[in-house]
Amino acid sequence: MIIRKFEESDRESLISLWSEVFPDDPAHNLPSSVIAAKLAVDDLIFVAQQDNKLIGACMAGYDGHRGWLYAVAVLPQQRRSGTGAALVKHAMQSLKDIGCIKVNLQIRSTNTQVAAFYKALGFAVEDRMSMGVFIK
């Protein structure tokens, strides 16, 4: 397995991966739109590839103060193989390399399996309330 930055030739595979792993995401998270919007800002999308097939991906962000992980995804048949952990560690190192000292992420409160995965990587639950608004 190799982990590298997203290339344009990965677009359809990444759209397929995110669509499979996040089938109930809201319309504003449409993979094709997310990829285009992210690439307009920076190139912090990382993919895991094995045998010339995209098996995982992670999008990262950095605002100069905090880093974020978004849309960490691994094909179901590749889970528990170390792919997700390797992607997260790679993204975190990339963020550290550009000056980031803290990485945040959000998961759905009902997703206890993913919470355990992140806790095993050193993440801790913080007493925060997540809020958002769509700009009209």
Image (cartoon, rainbow, N blue to C red):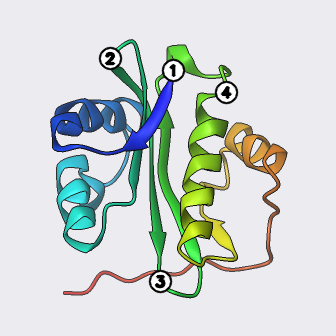
Of mark 4 and mark 3, the one earlier in the sequence is: 3
Cα–Cα span, label 4 and label 3: 28 Å
In the rendered picture of this protein, how many numbered marks are placed on residues? 4
Which numbered marker is on residue 52? 2
Quarter holding the C terminus is bottom left
- In front: label 3 or label 2: 2
- In front: label 1 or label 2: 2
Name the residue rendered at 66%, 44% in the picture.
Answer: 111
Which numbered marker is on residue 76? 1
Q: Which residue is mark 3?
A: 63
Which numbered marker is on residue 82? 4
**What SS does tag 2 mark?**
loop
Mark 3 Cα shell of 10 Å, populated few (<14), some (14-19), many (≥20): few
- In front: label 3 or label 1: 3
Report the amino acid beneath label 2: Asn
Cα–Cα span, label 2 and label 4: 18 Å
Is the residue under label 4 in contact with that under label 1 (CB below 8 Å)?
Answer: no
134 shown above or below 22: below
Cα–Cα span, label 1 and label 4: 12 Å
Report the amino acid beneath label 1: Pro
118 shown above or below 106: above
Residue 65, given in percent of the width and then of the height, sits at 58, 87
Report the amino acid beneath label 4: Gly
Mark 4 Cα shell of 10 Å, populated few (<14), some (14-19), many (≥20): few
Q: Quadrant of residue 125?
A: bottom right
